[in-house]
Image (spheres, helix red, strand yellow):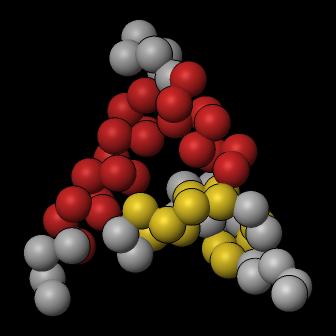
Amino acid sequence: MGKHIHICGICNQTKEDGIFLYQLYICQECEEKIISTSPKDENYQFYVEKLRAINQSSYTI
């Protein structure tokens, strides 16, 4: 079977490897960045806002 290509909800690039968190696809690279980002990191708030959007959209079914 071939790999599926999806658009990452974090970096907006098309990727083959990643995960789905609810309806949001997160590429492997962004997943690794999110996991390794410290709250003191300048990108931390960016990831929080992206993930917060998942939480808000999951209730609009």
Q: Quadrant of residue 8?
A: bottom right
In the rendered view, tell whether residue 20 sits above or below residue 39. below
Marks counted in the figure total: 0
Q: Is residue 59 left or right of residue 22?
A: left
Q: Position of residue 56 (x, y in %)?
A: 18, 65
Q: Position of residue 44 (x, y in %)?
A: 43, 28
Q: Position of residue 55 (x, y in %)?
A: 21, 60
Residue shown at 82%/79% (left/top)?
3
**Going by the picture, which residue comes out furthest to the top?**
40
Residue shown at 58%/44% (left/top)?
31
Q: Position of residue 37 (x, y in %)?
A: 51, 23
Quadrant containing the C terminus in the rendered view: bottom left
Front residue of this view, candidates 29 and 41: 29
Quadrant containing the N terminus in the rendered view: bottom right
Residue shown at 49%/66% (left/top)?
20
**Going by the picture, which residue comes out furthest to the right?**
2
Residue shown at 12%/75% (left/top)?
59
In the rendered view, tell whether residue 61 sits above or below residue 38. below
Q: Quadrant of residue 18?
A: bottom right
Front residue of this view, candidates 42 and 5: 5
In the rendered view, tell whether residue 1 sits above or below residue 39. below
